[in-house]
Amino acid sequence: MSNPAKTVRITVDNQVIEAPEGATLLQVMLDAGLDIPHYCYHPKLSIDGSCRLCQVKIDGMPKLQISCNTQVRDGMVVHVADPEVELTRRGVLELLLLNHPLDCPICDKAGECWLQNFAMRFGARHARTIEPRRKHGKRMDIGERILLDQERCILCRRCVRFCREVSKTGELFVFNHGDHSLLDIYDRRLDNDYSMNVADVCPVGALETKDFHHRMRVWFLEETASVCPSCSNGCNIMISAARGKIWRLTPRRNDEVNDTWMCDAGRLNYKFVGDAGRLVTPLVAGEGGPAPANWDDALQRAAGAIGDFVKRHGAKALGGVASPHLTNEENFRCGEMLRAVGVERIAMAVPRGKHDDFLIKAEKAANARGVRELGLVAGPDDGLEELLRACEAGEIRGLYVCGGDLLEAAPAERIDAILGKLDLLIVQDLAARPRFARAAVTLPATTFAEKDGTFTNHAGRVQRIRRALATPPGWRADGEIFTTLLNTLAARSERFEIAAVWEAMSRDGGRFAAIAFDRIGPEGAPLDAA
Amino acid sequence: MAVQVVNVRRPAATFSSAKPWLAILKGMWVSTRHFLGNLGLFLRGRQDFAIHFPEQRLVQPPALRGMPVLARMADGKERCVACGLCEWACPTSCITIYPAETADEVERYPEIFDIDMSRCMFCGLCEEACPEEAIIMSRQLEIASYTRAGSLWHKADLLVPVEQLKTRTDYIRRNYER
Ligand code: SF4
Ligand code: SF4
Ligand code: SF4
Ligand code: SF4
Ligand code: FES
């Protein structure tokens, strides 16, 4: 990459386009905003040249060329709006549709299907055949999370190349030749950790995820660009929501992070957002155990309890547990609040799990790096062992806990013994967990899909998350909880607005200072470049 | 929802373009015709011009669009495959469908199919959008209810044996050239 490629100029239908020498003609035309139909070409997979739909006329060539396998040359003259090209496309589409089942009313892809779209834009409107269409496998269970419909397959081999080149597992093959070609698995099921990406690369509804199968029409979905919350890789995603619910997550292209892929575990980890067991009202400790309270009362109780505790035991006896699931802004405000009270020891519990050398990272939370960059926690275990020892030694007698990860951070007996000794426990969590039953106040936490903010991924890339779902009226998101407590305990009058918090973060020094909030584009902004 | 904005060209009407005037004249002719007809009846002694519903009912033309209903097949199941096109076509968004999977060959069916009749305006766009001839404008017009909840029709209430919808299905096949 050190030698910037020479720029060449080509002409497409009288429009002059500049491109780096050797670039793929199809990609150059697509980048220039031209509407060139194509199926087998995918920017992140090798060239296959099997669908023949991308053909264009090039001066000096004896016949039409597939633009996906042609490199641009200086002075190349290309014709797209040309009767011969149009006739060829119509012919290719007619052949693809010869045996297509026309399942659109029951096909999950309908509405975002490349065969529908290109057939409407470039194809003939009527079939000329009356012969019965070929019959093949429907709803074939070829993997834990994937269904195959062989009748709908147009044999573009994108999925085959994905399994060979990206997941490197090679489960899918095209068997037989010519008219008898069929896509199928061979000796093992399509169960790799990235298997659901085949449903994204498939231009038609031949590969579908079981999770989204027959559940919602794509034209009802509202898409919100966000970031996967399930590990520290921070894959870029689209949240598809409708009727107040998330129906699927799909990867969004970011060449710096995840190309156009995401792992299956991350893709499926959205159901906790709409979980029936989520805590929706604050709980305060009462005579007969935790009882629901309104937000203002619960926040008053929490602030009062913290104030009393500090008066009685001193601020040093209060500890904090930050959450790697909360955004940079929320964690900054959390730190501000705890430090305003005088808290010295803050730790973080990060859930861990399986990882690989592609996307999946061991830290199963999106923003552990952000908490570290903010200087809230230090040490290889993020101060956790030190905090637990201080609790066991009785130096710390009160905890402000964000998230439920603490419960899994050490053997259950040890954590429960510590929690059992505390004089004050305040919890901010997605669910009311029995092991936190001694909490004086439990405040509902807010998920990644219900708020705006930024996450810092494992490599220090700051990326935006955006609100896709509304919260009930009167709801206080995590940042607002910290802000209310800060204002009450330290007599401040802050508001939780992301841009303003970001400014405060910058004033505070640290590496976030060098990134302007509005400079965080769709690809995020690396802390290092600053 | 992803909504595409299409800018429609609307040429301004001018005095010289005859059509608006023709339409006004046509409308005035309809009123005049009824007025003269009723005047004639009145002069011949008729006093009462009302139709005494429900004892008396108008004979409705075959093109009538009553409330939309779902066609029920001989096996007792709906013909609808929950494709969601009527739901999308409906200008008042009064249809709500939740699809689900079935073992039948059609693969999917509407687990929930609700129509809010208090919002329906009997436009028939749902019927026109349906690729399965599964939602049909029936001849049913008497759908008043004492409660709002009563205006929300669920799938079980909406299913009508397909033979009973023949007048309309014949009519739409003729008119939509199916
Ligand atoms: S299943 Fe889809 S991606 Fe795979 S070859 Fe067929 S059409 Fe292409
Ligand atoms: S690799 Fe990590 S960030 Fe990417 S999709 Fe999976 S869980 Fe989400
Ligand atoms: S008749 Fe019109 S308003 Fe009524 S359900 Fe059908 S599309 Fe909607
Ligand atoms: S358009 Fe027809 S098949 Fe589709 S959901 Fe409506 S009634 Fe059912
Ligand atoms: S996209 Fe070029 S041949 Fe398929």
Image (spheres, coloured by chain):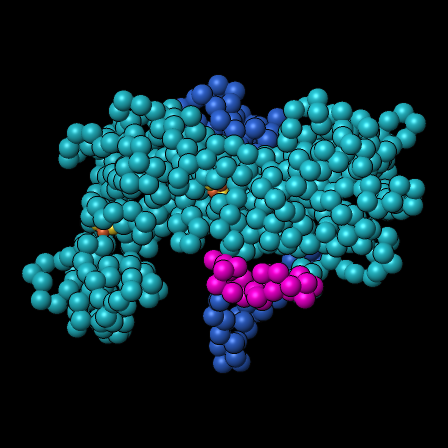
Chain colours: A cyan, B blue
Using residue A194 as the reference point, say whether residue A281 is left or right of it.
right
Using residue A86 as the reference point, say whether residue A114 is left or right of it.
right
Asked where in the image residue A19 lies, by quadrant, the reply is bottom left
Task: Residue A505: say if magenta.
Answer: yes
Q: Is A250 in front, or is B18?
A: A250
Using residue A164 as the reference point, say whether residue A207 is left or right of it.
right
Is residue A63 at least partly visible in the picture? yes
Q: Residue at x 12, y 67 (%)?
A: A59
From which residue to which does the magenta span run?
A: A504-530
Asked where in the image residue A81 lies, by quadrant, the reply is bottom left
Instruction: Give how far across and how far down residue B166 sits, in percent.
Output: 49, 32
Q: Residue at the top extreme?
A: B75
Task: Residue A321: say if magenta.
Answer: no
Q: Quadrant of the N terminus of chain A?
A: bottom left
Image height of A499 relative to A323, above or below = below
Asked where in the image residue A12 lies, by quadrant, the reply is bottom left
Q: Residue at x 17, y 73 (%)?
A: A75
Q: Residue at x 86, y 38 (%)?
A: A293
Instruction: Give how far across and how far down residue A285 sits, in percent.
Output: 87, 32
Q: Is A464 in front, or is B49?
A: A464
